[in-house]
Amino acid sequence: MEIQVEKKVLLTGIKPTGIPHLGNYFGAIKPALTMVSDDSYDARLFIADYHSINTIRDPKILKQYVYEVAATWLSCGLDPEKVLLYRQSSVPETLELNTILNAFTAKGLMNRAHAYKAAVDKNREKDKPEDHGINMGLYTYPILMAADILLFDANVVPVGKDQVQHVEMACDIAQAINHNYKSELLTIPSYVIDENTKTIVGMDGRKMSKSYGNAIELFLPEKKLKKTINKIVTNSQEIEEVKDPETCNVFALYKLFATKEQQDKLAKTYRAGGMGWGHAKGELFEVVNAELKPIRDKYYDLMDNKDYIDEVLKKGEAKAREIAAQKILKLRKAIGID
Ligand code: ADP
Ligand code: TRP
């Protein structure tokens, strides 16, 4: 007799706040798709649209970003027959759980959240009141994210380095609830982080991020991609000088795309002297374009076929709500609101 082993649940989300970039691709999309490719997880991937209204206030733009994120997952290889893909806002049970989690979350925990602290620091630097421009969506961001994770009993949550603290907070909140009701009501999640891709550098050597304006978009048309790569910041060394690949932004990105042999070859050229930055950037463009071209073509096809994306998301919604409704029922019972 075959023994059925229940698969672990893998869950991750991406906020539709801009066009996906190489940091999202290597830090979140690729690791998640690699993990789900062998069917060993019950995978749930979603578009965190409620999280984005903290900053995106134009409904047309928000809708466009949602399609872009969905088309990104699909073009990068997500198989909607095997992986559940849905919009956060399609699952209102998330908001019910969010309310429950609010009651168990210490205000002090939110005071310690990186994104909130960074916003406060920025205000202080500019001599503005501490909470200037900070909305409750940003302040309680980790609680909504915990609801996303805990509603679906996620065991593993692949994320980039900046999201680790949020997953840890989800654990803290879940533990407080389990402790109070003396029952394993909520599954305690673990984050998964890929050591090699936890921080992808941007064009200026800082972490690649939409908010730093240093991102290389994933689906730039070929010509624009070339132009953008040519703008990557390098030092002012002359052509004949020997160069160090390990401290170079161009090489850091090259490593993500190139084979070991290609990397060794380019590193040698750096160290031999006589190489201009234009050459390194040209080599980078070749490997980036070779990997991205097929997914870029698929992406633009999908963006021309929004009905298909709608259909995938609709199916995802039905299945996600089914799972979520059961979980909420169980929680309501446990807390005495049934
Ligand atoms: P951004 O910083 O551009 O706003 P998001 O916060 O929307 O990006 O990130 C979405 C996902 O991509 C998260 O899991 C995040 O950790 C990952 N990610 C974003 N930027 C990077 C980066 N430069 N390196 C590694 N992972 C990243
Ligand atoms: N906060 C994540 C980000 O900025 C997006 C997100 C929302 C998420 N809910 C989540 C990621 C739950 C993992 C699990 O990228």
Image (cartoon, rainbow, N blue to C red):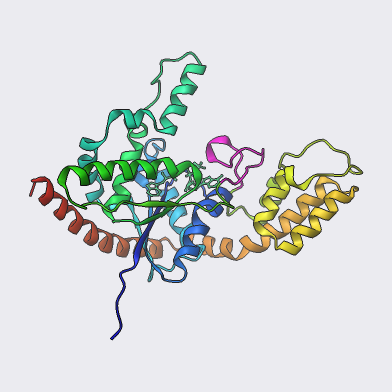
User: Considering depth in this image, is 129 or 229 the residue closer to the camera?
Assistant: 129
Q: Please, what is the dominant secondary structure of the magenta stretch? A: loop
Identity of the residue drawn at 31% across and 40% down: 143
| Residue 282 in sight here | yes
Q: Is residue 267 magenta?
A: no
Q: Position of residue 107 (x, y in %)?
A: 29, 29
Residue 41, image x, y percentages: 39, 66
Q: Is residue 136 left or right of residue 16?
A: left
- Residue 138 occupies which quadrant of the picture? top left
Instruction: Answer yes or no: is residue 96 visible.
Output: no
From the viewer's perspective, tell me whether residue 331 is left or right of residue 141.
left
| Residue at screen point 21% across, 40% down | 99
Q: Which percent across, then down, holds residue 291?
A: 64, 62
User: What's the magenta region?
Assistant: 199-216
In the visual, does 121 lie left or right of 247? left
At a point 32% along the width and 28% down the height, the residue shown is: 108
Q: Residue at x 53, y 36 (%)?
A: 211
Tally of numbered discs: 0
Residue 301, placed above or below residue 88: below
Q: Position of residue 183 (x, y in %)?
A: 18, 51
